[in-house]
Image (cartoon, rainbow, N blue to C red):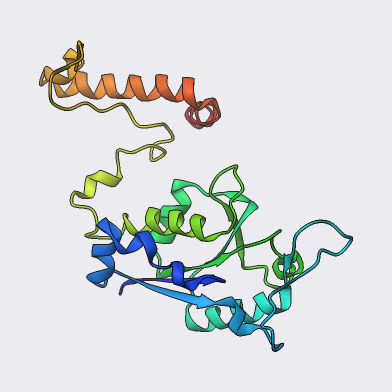
């Protein structure tokens, strides 16, 4: 059974886009996952295929209508029992642990926001929709977030990465940033590869990598470091 992705979007022509090349593209061609973009406007009922309206209470921009989106979500839910994720900066930040859960399932349905976002009643009426954010930034639409989420899932599917261990020793898998990497040449612009990495002593290499992962996480991501420390205590 392949991983099935449905994307509810106003711009279905954007997909598979960058997911049609490299690892994801090869996996798509091999049938390891499928990509089914769905045009939200197809669920509008007026002659103009309207999907948005002005914000209640005033303000700039437009808001995606709950009635139109609910019909689109219901249609997607009838086709798949995969989780439904809405891309929104108001959502819970996605984690690598959640990505692994999704990748281990039958697929995912992604609802891409646009304009000022969603009518909040959509989430009240369809409480199974999971609101997620890919980062503390605001994009012009959820499609870019959908690319990120799908790429993160697809690379974890069986047979997609050349080495199964490639997805294990990475940033966030153990609660830390990954240790730094080096490769040939041994010397470049007067900078050399750390001697321990050339020693052949696997125990010392493992200890060095853990120490650097901890040090870099503490320096660069104090939020991750505090969670890591709390989990160990």
Q: Residue at x 41, y 59 (%)?
A: 150
Q: Residue furthest right?
A: 57
Q: Is residue 209 above or below residue 22?
A: above
Within the image, what quadrant is residue 126 found in? Answer: bottom right
Q: How many marks?
A: 0
Q: Residue furthest left?
A: 200
Q: Is residue 66 above or below residue 199?
A: below
Res 27 seen here: yes
Q: Residue at x 53, y 79 (%)?
A: 76
Name the foreground residue: 205 vs 52. 52
Q: Residue furthest top?
A: 190
Q: Residue at x 40, y 66 (%)?
A: 105
x then y, percent, for residue 108: 46, 67
100 on left or right of 146: left
Name the foreground residue: 144 vs 7. 144
Name the foreground residue: 121 vs 53. 53
x then y, percent, for residue 107: 42, 68
Q: Is residue 138 above or below residue 194?
A: below
175 on left or right of 161: right
x then y, percent, for residue 216: 41, 22
Assign the N terminus to one quadrant of the image. bottom left
x then y, percent, for residue 49: 66, 83
Name the foreground residue: 158 vs 53. 53
Res 104 seen here: no
């Amino acid at each position: 059974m392949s991983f099935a992705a449905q994307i509810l979007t106003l711009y279905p022509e954007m997909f598979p886009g960058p997911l049609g090349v490299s690892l994801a593209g090869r996996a798509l061609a091999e049938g390891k996952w499928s990509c089914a973009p769905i045009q939200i406007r197809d669920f509008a009922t007026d002659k103009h295929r309207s999907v948005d309206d002005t914000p209640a209470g005033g303000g700039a921009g437009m808001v995606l209508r709950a009635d139109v989106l609910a019909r689109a979500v219901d249609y997607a839910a009838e086709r798949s029992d995969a989780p439904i994720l809405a891309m929104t900066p108001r959502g819970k930040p996605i984690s690598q642990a959640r990505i692994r859960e999704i990748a281990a399932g039958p697929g995912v349905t992604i609802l891409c926001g646009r304009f000022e976002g969603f009518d909040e009643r959509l989430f009240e009426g369809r409480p199974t929709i999971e609101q997620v954010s890919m980062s503390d930034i605001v994009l012009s639409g959820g499609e870019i977030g959908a690319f990120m989420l799908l790429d993160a899932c697809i690379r974890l599917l069986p047979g997609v990465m050349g080495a199964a261990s490639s997805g294990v020793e990475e940033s966030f898998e153990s609660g830390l940033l990954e240790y730094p990497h080096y490769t040939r040449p041994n010397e470049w612009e007067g900078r050399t590869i750390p001697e321990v990495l050339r020693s052949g002593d696997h125990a010392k290499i493992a200890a060095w990598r853990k120490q650097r992962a901890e040090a870099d996480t503490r320096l660069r991501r104090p939020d991750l470091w505090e969670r890591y420390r709390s989990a160990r205590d």
